[in-house]
Image (tube, rainbow, N blue to C red):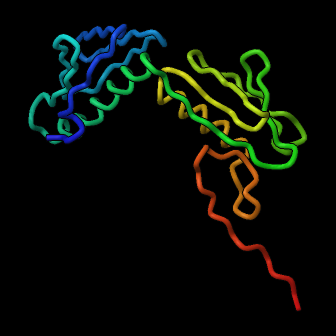
């Protein structure tokens, strides 16, 4: 039995769940999320607790047990609290701004890079160098943060680029001059 899968998922106040076979719909103050879970698991609700169980003892259902529990738990947390990924922009002249809903990044290219957020995701910028990607769906928030980081990944010599908050950049020594 999966150590993660056997843990129950407590439902906070103001969060409602509809279970229709393998389709799970979660509503909360931050939005609404839908997901169709893979076969081999069963989701049940008893009062304010959700449980995910493997349908049978086959290898396929045991593999998916912990995954589905985590997916449902992330949906519940997303509609109640939301998820945020923070990025830092490091480099002379590198900055970001939000125009309407679009994120505009200057990262040393001859042009500005604009990223349009999908529905349910918002961008926020502090001090021109701190970018926050927020939303209810953890998967989409992570993908959008990865797209922003991919504009200019951090380089190992000076550390310039866009990195996640708390990410450690392994630095390299530069070339040594001839003597």
Q: Is 128 placed above or below 75 here?
A: below
Residue depicted at x 82% and y 42%: 94
Quarter of the image where one finds residue 168: bottom right
Q: Residue 56: x and y, percent? A: 9, 32
Residue furthest toward the left?
A: 57
Quarter of the image where one finds residue 42: top left
Q: Residue 125: x and y, percent? A: 72, 29
Q: Quadrant of the N terminus?
A: top left
Q: Is residue 65 left or right of residue 150?
A: left
Q: Residue 37: x and y, percent? A: 30, 23
Q: Is 78 placed above or below 92 here?
A: above
Residue depicted at x 21% and y 18%: 49
Q: Quadrant of the C terminus?
A: bottom right
13 or 56, nearer to the observer: 13
Q: Residue 110: x and y, percent? A: 90, 41
Residue depicted at x 84% and y 33%: 112
Q: Is residue 81 left or right of residue 25?
A: right
Q: Is 65 placed above or below 88 here?
A: above
């Amino acid at each position: 039995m999966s150590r993660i899968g056997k843990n129950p998922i407590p439902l906070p106040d103001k969060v409602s769940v509809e279970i229709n076979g393998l389709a799970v719909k979660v509503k909360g103050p931050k939005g609404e999320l839908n997901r169709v879970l893979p076969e081999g698991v069963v989701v049940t609700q008893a009062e304010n607790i959700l449980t995910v169980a493997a349908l049978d003892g086959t290898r396929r259902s045991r593999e998916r047990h912990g995954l589905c529990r985590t997916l449902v738990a992330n949906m519940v947390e997303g509609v109640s609290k939301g998820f945020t990924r923070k990025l830092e922009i490091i480099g002379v002249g590198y900055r970001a701004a939000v125009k309407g809903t679009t994120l505009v990044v200057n990262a040393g290219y001859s042009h500005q890079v604009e990223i349009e957020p999908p529905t349910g995701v918002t961008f926020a910028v502090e001090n021109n160098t701190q970018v926050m990607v927020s939303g209810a769906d953890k998967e989409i928030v992570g993908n959008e943060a990865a797209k922003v980081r991919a504009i200019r990944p951090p380089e190992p010599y000076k550390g310039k680029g866009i990195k996640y908050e708390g990410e450690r950049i392994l630095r390299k020594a530069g070339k040594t001059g001839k003597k």
